[in-house]
Amino acid sequence: MKGSLYQSVKITHIGGDMMVWLIGAGILLSIGLLVDWLYTRIGIDDVDPNENARNVSVSERVYIESHMHNIRQNHDNTGGF
C-alpha cells in the first residue's frame, strides 16, 4: 500500500513538471504570435538583416565582434561553458 502511494505521488510530480514545460512553450508561442500580429498590423512586412546591419554603429559592431570572439575562444579552450 505504501509503495503505491509513493508511486502515485511520483507520477503526479512528473506530470507537474511536464505541465510547467507545456505552459512555458505555450507562452513562448503566444509571444511569437503576438509579435507577428503586431508587425503585420504596424505594416512591417520586410525585415532585411542586411539593411539592419548597415544601420549599426561602429561601437555596437566592435562590441558584438569582440563578444563573439571571446565566446569562440572560451568554447575552444574549455570545451563548453
Image (cartoon, rainbow, N blue to C red):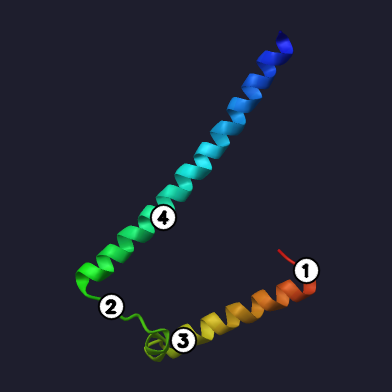
User: In the visual, does 59 lie left or right of 52?
Assistant: right
Residue to which mark 4 is pinned: 29
Q: CA distance from mark 3 to mark 4?
A: 33 Å
Q: Nearer the viewer, mark 4 or mark 1?
A: 4
Three-letter code, disc 2: Asp
Residue 52 occupies quadrant: bottom left
Q: CA distance from mark 2 to mark 1?
A: 40 Å
Q: Quadrant of the N terminus?
A: top right
User: In the visual, does 46 lie left or right of 22?
Assistant: left
Q: Nearer the viewer, mark 2 or mark 3?
A: 2
Q: Residues within 10 Å of mark 3 (few under 14, many from 20)?
A: few
Nearest to N terminus: mark 2 or mark 1 = 2
Three-letter code, disc 4: Leu
Q: Position of residue 34 (x, y in %)?
A: 31, 59
Front-lying residue, 78 or 1:
1
Q: Residues within 10 Å of mark 2 (few under 14, many from 20)?
A: few
Three-letter code, disc 3: Ser
Nearest to N terminus: mark 1 or mark 3 = 3
Residue to which mark 1 is pinned: 79
